[in-house]
Image (cartoon, rainbow, N blue to C red):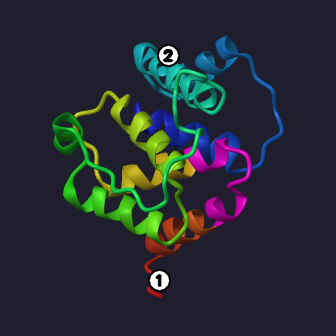
Amino acid sequence: MMDILMYLFETYIHSDVEVMIDQDELADELSRAGFHQDDIYKALNWLEKLAQLQYADKQPYLSGSAQSSIRIYTEQETRFIDQESRGFLLFLEQAGVLSPETREMVIDRVMELETQEFGLDDLKWVILMVLFNVPGNERAYTQMEEMLYDAQEGYVH
C-alpha cells in the first residue's frame, strides 16, 4: 500500500497536477500501473481517512494540547514504529515542523498502514502527506520536503 500512496503523492499531489479524478477512474489507472485491486482500495481509503482527520469531531488531533507534553507510545505503536522513527518524530516536533496535533495525525495514519515493513523513509513520506493535507502547514511541509529530498540526493547540512 505504501508504494501506491507514494505513487499517488508524486504523480498527483507533488507534481501540482490540477486534475479532479473520480475514485473509479483512479483505481483503473492504478490497476493499469500494476497495483493490486485490494491494495488500491486500501490506499484510497487511507487517503480518505487522512482528509477526514482534520474535520472529525471525534478525533482530538486539532483540539490542541500542551506544548510541553511528552508522547508515550503504546506497545502496539512501539512494535510498528521503531526507535529511530520515534526519535525522528520527536526531533521534528522539537524543531517545530510537527505540532502535537500533526504528530498524532501522522501516528494515526502510520498505524493504519497494512505493511510488514515500515521504516524511517516510509515515515517521512507519511509526514509529507499529512502536512500537505492540513491547512496552515505550508512552511512545515516545505521544511519536511527539503529534508526528504536532500537526504535522497545525499546532501548533508
* Residue range highlighted in magenta: 130-142
Residue linked to disc 1: 155
At x 71%, y 58%, the residue is: 138
- The residue carrying pointer 2 sits among few (fewer than 14), some (14 to 19) or many (20 or more) residues within 10 Å by Cα, namely some
Q: Which residue type does callout 2 highlight?
A: Tyr
Q: Which residue type does callout 1 highlight?
A: Tyr
Q: What percent of the width, then of the height, locates residue 142?
A: 65, 65
Residue 122, which numbered label? Answer: none
- The residue carrying pointer 1 sits among few (fewer than 14), some (14 to 19) or many (20 or more) residues within 10 Å by Cα, namely few
Q: What percent of the width, then of the height, locates residue 64?
A: 57, 45
Q: What percent of the width, then of the height, locates residue 156?
A: 44, 86
Above or below residue 47? Residue 66 is below
Above or below residue 122? Residue 61 is above
Location of residue 51 by image quarter: top right
Q: Earlier in the sequence, mark 1 or mark 2?
A: 2
Q: What percent of the width, then of the height, locates residue 119?
A: 28, 51
Helix, strand, or loop for circle 2? helix
Residue closer to the observer: 95 or 83: 95
Above or below residue 10? Residue 43 is above
**Total numbered labels placed on residues in the image:** 2
Q: Quadrant of the N terminus?
A: top left
Q: On the picture, is 91 further left or further right than 118?
A: right
Give the CA separation, mark 1 to mark 2: 36 Å
Location of residue 120 by image quarter: bottom left
Q: Residue furthest bottom?
A: 157
Above or below residue 121? Residue 152 is below
Residue linked to disc 2: 41
133 is within the stretch colored magenta:
yes
At x 62%, y 62%, the residue is: 140
